[in-house]
Amino acid sequence: MRIGIDIRPLIFTRAGIHTYVRQLVEHLSAVPGNQLFLFTSAASGVARDARTVKEVNLRLPQVHPWCERFWQSILLPPAARRERLAVFHGTRFWVPHGAGCPSVVTVHDLAFKKLSGLVEKKTAVFFDRLVRQSLRRADRVIVPSETSKADLIQLYAARPQQIEVVYEAAEKLFAPREKKTAQEECRRRFGITRPFFLFAGTLEPRKNLVRLLEAYGLIHDHSETDLVIAGGKGWQYQDMFAAVRRLGLESRVRFIGYVQPQELCALYNACEVFVFPSIYEGFGLPVLEAIACGAVAVTAANSALRELFGECTCQVDAGSAESIADGLRRAAADTGLRRALREKGLRRAGEFSWEKTAARTLEVYRQVIGDVPILP
């Protein structure tokens, strides 16, 4: 099958979408009979076998919104037609018009639509337009959870039969390790010498970090456990640093920035509790990575976090600092609860794999190829 994939997220993001695209390419290319055409606007760095994967680099002078629009509407469609694709997959909310083949688009979440004020306004407008266009153009829409499917139907009146749920997964490196070894690695790499709670994710308002800091402020005087926050800066992250100063937590809270997957695996294995009180998620990949490592997790009881991880994490009210604080206390101190959550988490994580994601995605491709004739 000749499959076209937009891989530009590999260039301009390091968040979960980056992982999604990289893993999808790797596992689709491993399936016999597939030939992948990876469309990009700059060198991607994707390891590939030239016999099964071809990078189509339609270069741009810079990453700029107007350049991106030119790439999408002018450069990409004829390049896709030249490759005589069976299907084109837009991996980040968007598919082109005029690619000459059926198309599939992945809509990862609808935070930009649901969280007014917690997503940058220009970003919300941009993605709203992309999704509306893609719903008109795409033959199928892939979403990572039933929550995202319901949101798409409710907010855009999307047709249920157009939407396919394809779960994501944790990379295989996220697995249980000996805790002392992981702690020693964290000490060497980050200078972490005390027990710690861990958050991992982009620093932005919807991750609810100010309320997490307020929750930690309620318990830090009675705990020897610090709080470590791992993740790259998004927008309005200054509020989080201001909250640390306001609450007098400078000596107990560490911001360590973006970390590589191997380092993140060590953090998951070394932490006392992983905490993820996000206000909204379309999937929640950091939670899956954490429980795949055997971490005890405290998560918000909302969106896809409730759907996918409700039975294997300690769920709390994202709107209440007291509820988050209570969840941290219980998850840290209740031995029976910790054992049960760890066992349930490992079982749940074992239900997901990128091999399953790729196989299910191929099923979606075959559906659209059967439903829509390929242009000559």
Image: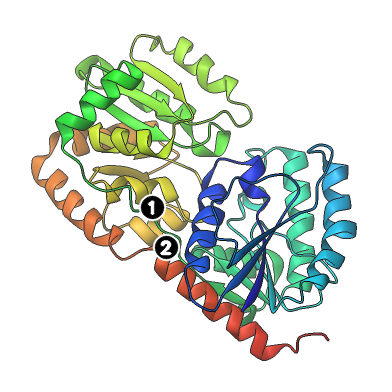
Q: Amino acid at mark 2?
A: Trp
Mark 1 packing: few (<14 Cα in 10 Å), some, or many (20+)? Answer: some
Outermost residue toward the front? 51
Outermost residue toward the left? 336
Most foreground residue, 309 or 116: 309
Most foreground residue, 235 or 300: 235
- Quadrant for the N terminus, please: bottom right
- Among the two numbered marks 1 and 2 on one chain, the one whose residue lies closer to the N terminus: 1
Visible in this render: residue 314?
Answer: no
Residue 66 in the image: state x and y as whole percent. Answer: 88, 43
Give the side of residue 235 with respect to residue 19, left or right: right
- Residue at mark 1: 171
Q: Is residue 264 above or below residue 32?
A: above
- Residue at 40% from the left image edge and 36% from the top image edge: 320
- Residue at 62% from the left image edge and 55% from the top image edge: 110
- Quadrant for the C terminus, please: bottom right
Q: Amino acid at mark 1?
A: Glu
Q: Is residue 2 above or below residue 224?
A: below
Give the side of residue 203 with respect to residue 353, left or right: right
Quadrant in the picture for residue 195:
top left
Residue 18 in the image: state x and y as whole percent. Answer: 56, 48
- Residue at 36% from the left image edge and 45% from the top image edge: 299
Asked whether the beta carbons under mark 1 and mark 2 sit within 8 Å of each other, the answer is: yes
Q: Is residue 208 above or below residue 167?
A: above
Per the rendering, the mark at residue 354 is 2
Residue 315 in the image: state x and y as whole percent. Answer: 32, 48
